Image (cartoon, helix red, strand yellow):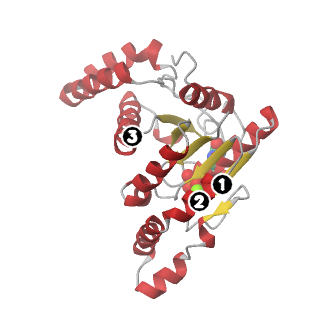
Amino acid sequence: MGKTIVVFIGPAGAGKSSLVHAYSKWLEETFSYRIYKINLDPAADYIPYTPDFDVRSIIDVHRIAIEYGLGPNGALLKSMDILANKIDIIEKVINSIDLDFVLIDTPGQMEIFIFRDIAIKLMDILKRISRQLVVVFVIDADVIHRYEDYAFISIMSVAIQARLGVDVIPIINKIDLVPKLDVVGDLISDAKIVIEKLRTLGTYGEMMSSILSTIWLYAKATRVPRVSAKMLENIEELHRIVHELTCVCGDLT
Ligand SMILES: Nc1nc2c(ncn2[C@@H]2O[C@H](COP(=O)(O)OP(=O)(O)O)[C@@H](O)[C@H]2O)c(=O)[nH]1
Ligand SMILES: [Mg+2]
């Protein structure tokens, strides 16, 4: 087996770093896999795992703020652009890893990653290094309450896929805080319900339901795992989809 690369993307606080920690722990304990963990968040104050490569060793966001006279957001954007120009360092590191999994944690604010060159440059490198590559789009369970919210994450997830050219698995984290989530978890069986519900919501609802019908027609993995990084709940469901998307071996429904 070559190395499987999993990149965690998502809004600030959704639980990317916690999931890198939870997934790596679960993979080590369940399969004795050897994991390499990469932190690409230059502004991280606390990381729940011990990174094997830490971007903070090559980028000092506080020094950049002073050097360029920038505020916190400007310094983060500058950091990402500097990192994009130092991407060969990351390439060398990942190329030299001879382990089962590489988990990559991205900056807290997803926009400073996904809207910059760094995301495209990194994905190009990762695609060259391994065909076993997948992106996990992490969403906080507390923002998913309605059918429209479900439509929103499906559309966002496809938009990320379109920009990066890599399969994206949307997952709902912090399920321990929202025990009764009034949306579906298996879109193959429940797609019809969501689409019909959306259709009753007027013009925008109709538009969303047609977009979703098309998205789900082409989607490779339609399950949306609900996990808790904190309680290590349902991590196996996340892994099942990562495995199916990266091993070219099975049923994706
Ligand atoms: N209750 C609960 N809290 C979580 C979970 N995952 C992450 N958190 C908390 O959410 C906050 C943000 O998590 P973090 O992993 O740093 O988010 P990131 O910005 O996406 O990397 C931290 O206080 C975590 O302890 C979870 O599954 N359940
Ligand atoms: Mg983080």
Give the left or right position of residue 210, taking residue 92 as reference.
Answer: left
Residue 40 can be seen in this image: no
State the residue position of label 2: 92
Q: CA distance from mark 2 to mark 1?
A: 6 Å
| Residue highlighted by disc 1 | 96
Q: Position of residue 140 (x, y in %)?
A: 52, 43
Give the mark nearer the N terminus: 2 vs 3.
2
Residue at image position (50%, 19%) is 186
Between 179 and 162, the one nearer to me in the picture? 162
> Looking at this view, is 199 or 20 the one in front?
20
Figure check: 139 above or below 205: below
The outermost residue toward the left is 203
Instruction: Tell me the quadrant of the picture where the N terminus can be found.
Output: top right
- What residue is pinned by disc 3? 165
Q: Residue 253 placed where, x, y %?
A: 51, 16
Amino acid, disc 3: Gly
Q: CA distance from mark 3 to mark 1?
A: 24 Å
Percent across and percent down for residue 91 are 55, 57
Q: What's the CA distance linking mark 2 and mark 3?
A: 22 Å
* Label 2: which secondary element: helix
What amino acid does circle 2 point to? Lys
Helix, strand or loop at mark 3: loop
What crowding class fits label 3: few (fewer than 14 Cα within 10 Å), some (14-19), or many (20 or more)? some
**Residue 90, placed above or below residue 67:** above
Give the residue type at disc 1. Answer: Ser
Residue 128 is tagged as none
Question: Are the two marked residues, 2 and 1, in contact with CB atoms closer than 8 angstroms?
Answer: yes
